[in-house]
Image: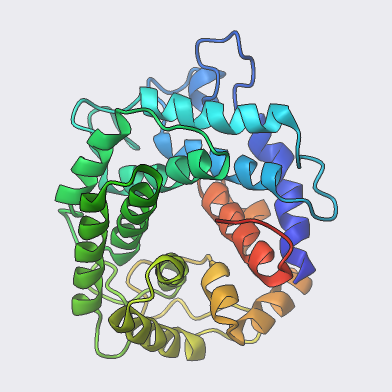
Amino acid sequence: MDALRKIVLSQAPRLLGLMDRDRHSRTYGCCERYYWHYKLHDFPNCRFQEIGEILALLYKNDFEGNRYCGKEKVRAWALAAAEFWIEWQRPGGSFDEAYPNEHSFCSTAFSTLSAVRTWKLLGAKPPDRLAKTGKWLSKKKNEKRNISNQMAAAALALHELSLLTGEGDHKLAANAKIDRIVSEQHKSGYFLEYDGGDTGYQSVTLSLLMRFLELDPRYDLKEAVIRGFKWIEPRIDETGNWSAAGNSRGARFLFPNGFALKKNPVLERIERGLADNVLLHPGWMDDRYAIGLTLDYLLAWLELSGSGEKK
C-alpha cells in the first residue's frame, strides 16, 4: 500500500500552505487560510486545526520520503495548531465549525481528538482549560440525528484525554458513548448515520472504533465492529467504490485505517482503486475534507508499514 505513503506526502505541502506559519502573526497556527489570509471568513473553522496531528505524526515518524521527520519547525507548527485551536474555545468548552457560537458537537469531537493527540505525541503539557472541553463532550451528544461517526470521535477523544490528563471521569464518559453506539447499531451491522447506513461514514466509524479498541479491548465493541465489517465488505467493489443507492448520506470517501487495523481484504480493493486512479483520495478533495482523509491515510500507512509511532 505504498500509494498511501505517496498520497500523504503529496498532500503535506498543501496542508502546510493552509497554515499561518509566521510566529509573529496574531493568527500564528491558524490552519484556515480563508480566515487568516484571504479574510473571507469572520471566524476560523476549528476542524482545520486537525492539520496539527498530521504534522505531529510526520515529525515523529521516519519513513521514505518524509522530509518533515525530526524538524523542530514542524514540531513547533504542530503545537501552534493546537494552541490556536484552544484559543477559540467557547466559554462552555465547545468549538465552532459553520457559524459563531454554533457549539458544534462534530467540530468539538474531532478537533479535540486531534489536539489531544498532538500534545500527547509531542510530549507537551496541555492547557488546563482543556478540562472544560472534556466536561462539555462528556455531557453532550449530537442533538439532531443519530450520527455514529461523531459519537465515536467523541468517545475516542475522551479516552485519549483521560490518558493524557489522568481524569477518570473522561474515560467513563467515553465508555458511555460507546455503550450508546453499540446499542443503536442496526442488526444488519451498520452504525447509524441519519437513521440509516452509509458506506463512506461506516468506514469513518470503523476507523475510530478500531482505534478505541487499541486503548480498551471491550468484548461488546469487538463484536459490534465485526458486524460492522460484515456489513461494509460486500458493498465495496474491486476498486474500492460502491453504489450510491441505499446510503443515508451519500458519502463517496473511504477511510482505510479501520481496514488496516483489522487487516481486512478490502485493503486490496483500495490499493487497486488507487493504482487505477479511480478511487476518491485526498488529492481530489476540497481542503476541509482532505485533512481528515489524509490523516486516516497516514495512520493506515503507519499501521501497515510498521515503520512508525502513531500513538
* Left or right position of 12 against 97: right
Q: Quadrant of residue 91?
A: top left
* Left or right position of 3 against 56: right
Q: Is residue 126 above or below residue 203?
A: above
Residue 254 visible in the current orientation: no
Q: Nearer the viewer, residue 39 or 118?
A: 118
* Residue 50, horizontal then vertical, whole percent: 50, 42
Q: How many marks?
A: 0
Looking at the figure, which quarter contains the C terminus?
A: bottom right
Q: Is residue 142 above or below residue 238?
A: above
Q: At 61% across and 87% down in the image, what residue appears?
A: 265
Residue 151 visible in the current orientation: yes
Q: Nearer the viewer, residue 277 or 184?
A: 184
Q: At 78% across and 57% down in the image, what residue appears?
A: 6
* Residue 47, horizontal then vertical, whole percent: 43, 40
Looking at the figure, which quarter contains the N terminus?
A: bottom right
* Residue 237, horizontal then vertical, whole percent: 59, 86
* Left or right position of 132 against 40: left
Q: State the colouring used for the structure image.
A: rainbow
Q: Quadrant of residue 309?
A: bottom right
Q: Is residue 267 above or below residue 5?
A: below
* Residue 118, horizontal then vertical, whole percent: 52, 41
Of all residues shown, which one is farthest toward the front? Answer: 166
Of all residues shown, which one is farthest toward the right? Answer: 65
Q: At 64% across and 57% down in the image, what residue appears?
A: 298
